[in-house]
Each structure stands twice: as structure tokens, then as C-alpha cells.
Amino acid sequence: GAVTIGVTFIFAMVIACILNMTTVASLSELNALMPNTTGGLAQYTLACMGPFPTIISMVGGYILCNVLSCGVEASIFSYAMSDTFSFLHIPSLGYVLIVTTLLMIANLFGVDIFAKLQDVVAFLLVGSMLLMGIIGAIGIGFGKKVDQPYTMATDFNSIVSMTAVAFWLFIGAEYVIPVSKSVKNAKRNVPLGMMIGLGLICIVQSILVFGFHNYVPWAELADSPAPHLLYGMNLLGTFGKIWMTLVAAFAVISTQNSTVNALASICQGMAKMNMMPQVFAKTNRRGVPYVGVVFVSVMIFVFSALSNNSSDAISFLILVGSVFWMISYILAHMDVLILRKRFPKAPRSFKVPLGPVIPVIGILGTIYMILNISTDTAERNAIWLVTGGTFLLLGIYAFFWIKYKMKMPVFKSI
């Protein structure tokens, strides 16, 4: 994003952050209405629109894009590790296999281990990124500062067109919802935590953009499959490169840990609703849906292998995953509007203010991002083709699953 329009990308990030905050607000209201869900978005959409859009949006628009995005992040991590520690002669995918296996085992031990690991890694990750960003932004790094323009585009259309790229920085705040029943004072802490999280990420990434400008030529940043690694090297030499490699490790551990935990719970919830094979509902003696944990971990490794060491593949898969995710967010806004119409007097401990205004803004803004998912016409068409084809196949699968396995009307709300 920064190499395309310069530091004005920060404005695109702010817009994307606000749009994601509208989604978080809608999800918080849905969680207030149905606080004991394990299926997350699946249960909300099932209650509003029936099983057909639920299966399509959750299997394609959520589960698939989550494992895809996590696999892509893992491939960035593996590149960073193999480049920094090349003397170990470990193939890049070997690092992904090690981390994936360890996190799978950790999650099989239950939510307590997941939460402890997530706390430590999140603090180290955000703290490191903030510190590296500040060092670069105020120009006190060891490396040579770069003389280059702050901006390549300042017009409104260029900035808004980059919101789809910026969107990627803020996805996943809703991972907390499947485990919200285990959160203290969930009515307050779930929406507040998601909002604070998005705001913090926006601040940290904005500071990093100024650091990029000061220490990395835009052209080099664009061509790197691990731009944060390049930034660390230019900023603090070998020490900075190793530090940023650790940041990459923290990032993949944080994302993969939360993804495995949340998606396994969502698969369990969907299996309980007979929307996925019953095997996903099975739990081990610690109450963990172990089949989902193993399945999600394996799929993450597969997508990591597909995007291994290719910046073009990483970029394309990120944008494909974004479209899937955006569609699921649109459905969340629609769920809020439908349930307000259907159950206007139902008790809600949290309600999105300003009536339908915020959900409608969220829907329109997200549709705009889908229509402008890439500035390259050929890439944009390819993304639409992949996502459209995937949803078509999922639609065929969903129709036959509902008709012959669930034995119910495809649009009957439950």
C-alpha cells in the first residue's frame, strides 16, 4: 500500500479501520443477542437467512479464507526464517511445519494454554512493531536514510482505491467471539477489546509507514516478499533483521494460534447444527474439538506450501482472501438489520447506535472495496473469477448438503 501511493496510504488505513469498526459494532450486537454461540457468524446468519447462505459464507467466506490467509502469513514467516538463518540449511517449509505442529499440540490442550500463549505473543508483537516504527519514523536508526518523496498520489480516488489493501491489516478482530463465553465481563470487554485492538493496529502501522519512507526505497519495498525484513535490515543492520524475523515469528504464532482455536470452535458449532460433518463436533477430554484443530492446522500448511517464497502469489492470495472475508462481513451487517426488523424488542446489552446508518455504511463501504480490490484490471478480474468460481462450487455443495443431509428448505431461517 505504501509503495503505491506513499505515506498517504495512512488515510486508506484509517478508512479501512473505520469500516472494520462498523463490522465489529455489528458483531458485538449479534453477540449480545446470541451470547452462547460457538459457530459465530454461522449461527447469526442461520437465524436470519437460513442454511444456504450460511454454508456458502462460512465454509467459503470464512473458514476457507482464514486458512488461506494464515497460510500466506506462514509463508512470509518461513521466507524470513530461511533467509536470516540460512546457515542452518532448513528448508523454508520446515519452519512452517515446526510452528504448525507445536501450535496444533498447544491448542489440543485447551483454551487456557491458547490464551496464555496469545497474551505473551501479542504484547511482544505489538511492542516490537511500535518500537521499530518509532525508531524509523524519528530517524534514529543505524542505517542510511533514504531521500525519496513522501507521496506518489494525494488525490481522493487513489487513496480510497487502496482501502481494499489496507483492509487486510484489520481483519480477524472477531476471533474473540467463539470464546467470548470464557471472557470476564464479556458484555463490555468483547466490543471494547475489538475496538481498542483495531485502533492500536492503525496507530502502529501508521508509524511504520513513516519508518518505511525514511529507510527503504519504495521500489525495493515493492519487490520484497518480506518487506518488514528489508526494513529491519536497513534500519538496524543484522540486529534489525533478526529482530524483524522474530516479529514475523510472533505474527505467525499469534495469527495461527487464534485461527486454529477460533475455526475449530466454529467448525464444532456448525457440526452441532448439522451443517458440517459430525466428526467436527467431537471433543477430547479437555473439551477441545480436536478434529477441527487438526484439520485447520493441516490446511494452513497446505496454503503455506502453495504461496511459498513468491511475492506475487502472496499478494494475489491475500486479495482473494480479503474478498471472501469482506462478503462474510457484509452478511454480518445484514444479519443485524434483519434481526432488528424481526425482533425489535429483544434485549440487547450492546446496540449499534444511529439505527441502520452504521450497518448500511459498512455494507456500502465493503462493496466498494470488493469492486476495487486491485488497481490492476487483469488481477482484479482474476480475483473475481477465483472467488466467483469458489462460491459457485460451494453453492452446489450447499444445495445438495441441505436438501439430502439436513433435509430442510435451503432458505428456512432457524
Image (cartoon, rainbow, N blue to C red):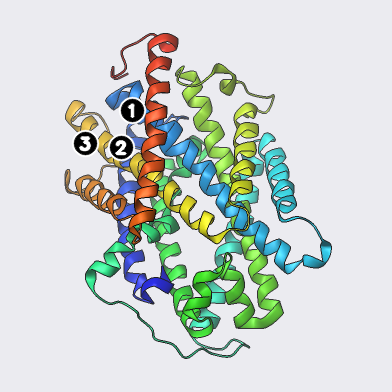
Instruction: Identify the residue at horizontal 53%, vertical 81% (top origin).
Output: 216
Is 395 positioned to the left or the right of 336 in the image?
right
Can residue 79 be seen in this snapshot? yes
User: What's the CA distance linking mark 1 and mark 2?
Assistant: 9 Å
Instruction: Identify the residue at horizontal 29%, vertical 68% (top origin).
Output: 159
Q: Residues within 10 Å of mark 2 (few under 14, many from 20)?
A: many
What number is the disc on residue 331? 2
Q: Position of residue 287 (x, y in %)?
A: 63, 27
Seen from the viewer's position, the closer of residues 64 and 197 is 64
User: What's the CA distance linking mark 1 and mark 3?
Assistant: 16 Å
Seen from the viewer's position, the closer of residues 131 and 390 is 390
Q: Amino acid at mark 2?
A: Leu
Instruction: Identify the residue at horizontal 63%, vertical 23% (top origin).
Output: 283
Mark 1 and mark 2 residues within 8 Å of each other at the beta carbon = yes
Q: Which residue is mark 1?
A: 53
Q: Position of residue 256 (x, y in %)?
A: 59, 47
Q: Which residue is mark 3?
A: 337
